[in-house]
Image (cartoon, rainbow, N blue to C red):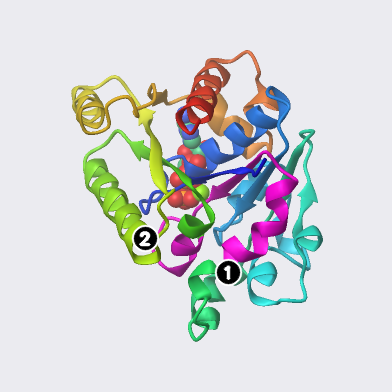
Amino acid sequence: MSARRVAFINEKGGTCKTTLAVNVAAYLAEKKKKRVLLVDLDTQGHAGKSLGVDPRGLSKNVFHLLTDAAVTLEQVTLPTATANLSLVPSWKEMAEFPTLAASDPERARLLARRLRPALDHYDFVLFDAPPSLGLTTTNILLAAEEVVVPVATTYLALDGCAEMVATVDDVKATYGHQALRITLVVPTLYRKTQLADEVLAKLRQYFPRRTAEPFALSVTVDEAQSHGKTIWEYAPWSRGATMLQSIAEAVDKAGR
Ligand SMILES: Nc1ncnc2c1ncn2[C@@H]1O[C@H](COP(=O)(O)OP(=O)(O)OP(=O)(O)O)[C@@H](O)[C@H]1O
Ligand SMILES: [Mg+2]
């Protein structure tokens, strides 16, 4: 069986992409006993940091995998404190990737190609995307089949969401990647206000059956990340953990 490939994408910053990618990955690995690879593609290296991995001192990361054919996937894959969860870290060099790859006719498919050996070794490959659209995100969309869009329940969030739908359609058509689809939209940073409820209602209207339960604000979730721990390590009985479990189950179910 080939790995399911799930990308967490929104061009808008701070919509919980990393929080969801990391904790869904850890949930699938620990609670569902799946073999999971989490690939960070963001220059901030937050997926690594959230898992207690300091991406600064590493000699090789996802950038080297993408730009140096001599670098293997094994060389950039690290174990994490969660059993069955491996990480391909990212760091600042990724900012150079679009320029360096610009003249390569296959530049949009580099990630998909370099990850091919992983597809037999893992049940899931999850991608943590940067908050921008560009060559890196196109690479993620061509390496993935399922797209999860975390949308902040705030003003202008719907704009970003419409943009993501257009981007996915565009990549699907341009590259003939028929399997690509938005499987789930996750309303995030939710507080019970009139505006948030209006945004939530609109999301449910645009994405019937594909809108997850809202991921409410929770200090524990923020704290876990600041300690470099998953919610399952830091506060498995918290409300944050309950919400993240329900989202992880929804991600799992939505793509099947
Ligand atoms: N449910 C929550 N309650 C409170 N804070 C949260 C929650 N989820 C995430 N956060 C915090 O919000 C911030 C942004 O989250 P996160 O890093 O996951 O977003 P992102 O979309 O990956 O951001 P970027 O676009 O910069 O990559 C982080 O500090 C995180 O700890
Ligand atoms: Mg992030």
Q: Which residue is drawn at 69% across and 71% down?
A: 64
> Which sits in the foreground, 220 or 116?
116
**Residue at the (58%, 15%) spot, across then down:** 238
Q: Position of residue 79 (x, y in %)?
A: 80, 45
The quarter of the displayed image where residue 195 is located: top left
Circle 1 — which element? helix
Disc on res. 225: none
Asked if the magenta segment contains residue 245, the reply would be no
The CA span between labels 1 and 2 is 15 Å
Position of residue 104 relative to residue 110, above or below, is below
Residue most extreme to the bottom? 103
Density class for disc 2 (Cα within 10 Å; few <14, some 14-19, many ≥20) is some
| Disc number placed over residue 110 in the picture, else none | 1
Q: Is mark 2 on a helix, strand or loop?
A: helix
Return the x and y of residue 148 as percentages of the image width and height.
44, 40
Taking the spot 37% from the left edge, 54% from the top edge, the residue there is 11
* Residue lying at 49% horizontally and 70% vertically, measured from the top left: 108
The amino acid on which the numbered mark 2 sits, given as a three-letter code, is: Val
Q: Where is residue 95 in the image (x, y as percent from the top left)?
A: 53, 71
* Few, some or many residues within 10 Å of mark 1 (<14, 14–19, 20+): many
User: Which residue bears the numbered disc 2?
Assistant: 171
**Where's the N terminus, which quadrant?**
top right
